[in-house]
Image: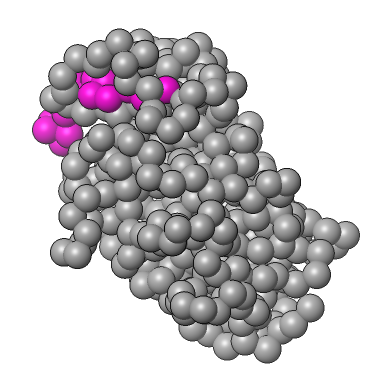
Amino acid sequence: MEALEEQLLHLSIAKRSTMKDSTTYILDIDVSKSTEEQNSQTVAILCSDKTIRLYNKETMTCLQEYNARPDVLSGVRFSHTNGNLVFSACSDGTVKLWDARSSGPGAVQVYTGYPSNVFISFDVSCNDLVVCAGTEKVESDAFLVFWDGRYIANTESKEPLGAYSESHNDDVTQVRFHPTNPSLVATGSTDGLVNVFDINENNEDDALTSTCNSDSSVNMIGWAGRDFKQVYCLTHDEGFLWWDIAQVDTEEAITLCKVDDMREHVSECHVDYLVDGFYHEKQNTLLLLGGSHNGDISLFKCNRGQVTHLKNLAGGHTATVRSVFWCGGDEFLITGGEDAQLLFWKAKATSPKKKDSMKMASSVQQRVRVHSTKSLLTKQK
């Protein structure tokens, strides 16, 4: 653990890239996986101007830009097996797939939802076989919609395999597939619930393996722990909850840690909001990132029953930080914010040059509930 803490204590800015338009927020970040066929990695950022921009990770030159105007995009995810393919959910009731090898700016495949669907969250299973998107609540319904995720050339659109509609009763703000088990998916909602499903089951009732109640509105969720048998949650009122779902059927308490409001919990630094969390697999450690509205970032380590402050990352951003990505293989942290800056943090880094020379080239209920039976493969709306 000392090695991890030592590494994090020496994080400093290795690269700084500034958007051409200083009013553009960076809302989400993803990095393509390294494969034998694709040694170079690509960084994708979701921007507040309704665009997705792809950059070479080493040179930070712009490779491509996509947009869905006038509709709004939510989230950005690379294919796990093909670094040329990038997904995003869209408010027009679709999930769109772009191919960086394509000469055109349009999506190469569109996953269409049911009438009235407005997607605000999504994810892709670790084997790329399933795409799942969460909707805003429309009347009394909030849906999880599923598709066959495989890209088929010359196929413009795909219809859903089916949907779940009983497990959340408000906006589905987060969808996160298990990092290694493609049949498990966790979801979070403004109804306060974090649900875990096994989509190999034939119906929604059997698929729902556990439900954890945050007693608040869920903002972010993620997987943690050995074999990823834990889930954590950040709430819209800056709370933090961490559960061991492997113990959900026992009499033992499954809550590993609960902080009602991180703004009041810490005294070593000033926190206005929580950004996100990431699990450091090599060190079996869950880390949180908080921020202040002046751009400072705070790193926290989570232990059972407590959250402790590790380090402040100051002098980088000048406004609210909206997104983070931890590159586990390279031990590299990427952050993006409302100051239109994308920062790369590493323990051993050269001092950044002037900003102008580094601009981007381009531009709730019970803990466990029983639900009615709805089949993923047969339910239609």
In the current view of this chain or complex, which residue is farthest to the front?
103
Residue positioned 71% across, 84% down in the render: 379
**Vertical placement of 377 versus 18: above or below?**
below
Q: Can residue 373 be seen in this snapshot?
A: no
Q: Quadrant of residue 380?
A: bottom right
Residue 212, horizontal then vertical, whole percent: 57, 56
* Quadrant in the picture for the N terminus: top left
Q: Residue at x 47, y 13 (%)?
A: 318
Instruction: Decide if residue 312 is on the left or right side of residue 264.
Output: left
Of residues 14 and 222, which is closer to you in this image? 14
**In the image, is residue 167 above or below residue 47?**
below
Where residue 263 sits, quadrant-wise, is top right
Relative to 28, is 93 above or below? below
| Number of marks drawn | 0
Residue stretch rendered in magenta on the structure: 1-18
* Residue 9 colored in magenta in the image: yes
Quadrant assignment, res 266: top left
Q: Is residue 53 above or below residue 2?
A: below
Which residue is located at x 44 percent, y 51 percent? 222
Which x, y percent locates residue 190? Answer: 69, 48
Q: Position of residue 238 (x, y in %)?
A: 57, 31
Residue 57: say if magenta.
no
Colour setup of the view = one colour
**Front residue of this view, candidates 269 and 314:** 314
Q: Residue at x 49, y 50 (%)?
A: 76
Residue 46, percent from left and from top: 52, 42
Q: Quadrant of the C terminus?
A: bottom right
The answer to whether residue 56 of the structure is visible from this angle is: yes
The answer to whether 350 appears left or right of 220 in the picture is left
